[in-house]
Image (cartoon, rainbow, N blue to C red):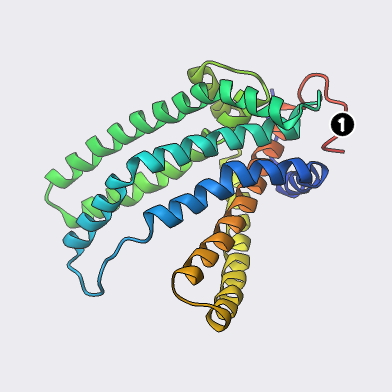
Amino acid sequence: MERTKLDISEAWASAVRMVAANRDMLMAIAGVFFLLPGLALSVFMGDPQVAPGTDPKVALSILAQTYLSAAPLLILVTLLQMVGTLTVLIVMTDPARPTVAQAIRRATVTTPPYFGAQVLVGVVVGFSFVMIASLASLAGSAVLTTAVGLALGAAMIWIGLRVSLVAPVIATDGERNPLHAIRRSWDLMKGNSLRLALFLGLTLLLFLVVYGLVMMFVGVVLVLVTGGEIQRVLRDVVSSAISAVALVYLAAMIAAVHRQLAGPPAGEAGRVFE
């Protein structure tokens, strides 16, 4: 059986159509699940205070302590963003046209299997990579350790691409078993990992350019009209808003890729993609 090859041009066009067709609902969802949690994380966590010239080991210790102390908030924000991602997928792909409240309820129910799939991948991959890296370091060769580190980084990206469709498999296809969702994503992405990497890479580049230009302009304006803590909060608001929009488009892109490789959901009337 010949596998479908991902068409990134069509995937991007489908993603844009999905966002445009559901703009008002997506703005509300993004505000609640992406913008506000991201803003809370920026305001309450802040930036790790590492002075220039600090010893790398000390700097790593400071970073670790900062993120460890913020672990409860990080977990809460992660869970909210998971619910938000699933809600966005349901709103964009369900032909039954659910309301925002209905989509949130369904997303809340489907978050545990999605979270479970993420944990399974994280634990298995993390444990395997730590073991391999530890064995490489025992060899005492800096070259070997570096080569293994680069190989592990590439492998981690590849695995991430292969399991990138877990969310739409759960939200759109209705799969509730985390293992089955991982396997389904793995099968759908076979032969398409490089195409998806190119798709996401180009989009990331576009986002970084837009983000940099907007934040540079906003920074200049804020320096001229305000200062101190108000300036930092307003900067964080703009940054969180841009990130929220990016997360909506990322979910749309993943939904478009899933639809292209798996086919439209049962009963779809073409309201979003056509």
Q: Position of residue 20 (x, y in %)?
A: 80, 47
Residue at coordinates 56% horizontally, 75% vertically from top-left? Answer: 216
Residue at coordinates 40% horizontally, 38% vertically from top-left? Answer: 75
Residue 214 vs 89, above or below: the answer is: below
Q: Position of residue 206 (x, y in %)?
A: 63, 62
Instruction: Say which of 94 and 239 sits in front.
Output: 239
Q: Position of residue 261 (x, y in %)?
A: 69, 32
Q: Position of residue 195 (x, y in %)?
A: 62, 46
Tell me if I can see residue 190 in this picture.
no
Is the C terminus in the top left, top right, bottom left or bottom right quadrant?
A: top right
Q: Quadrant of residue 222?
A: bottom right
Q: Quadrant of residue 271?
A: top right
Instruction: Say which of 94 and 224 sits in front.
Output: 224
Residue 176 vs 55, above or below: the answer is: above
- Secondary-structure class at tag 1: loop
In the image, taking residue 126 as reference, residue 271 lies left or right, namely right
Residue 19 vs 90, above or below: the answer is: below
Is the N terminus in the top left, top right, bottom left or bottom right quadrant?
A: top right
* Residue assigned mark 1: 270
Tell me if I can see residue 47 in this picture.
yes
Residue 15 vs 269, above or below: the answer is: below
Residue at coordinates 17% horizontally, 67% vertically from top-left? Answer: 55
Q: Give the residue type at disc 1.
A: Gly
In the image, taking residue 113 as reference, residue 51 lies left or right, namely left
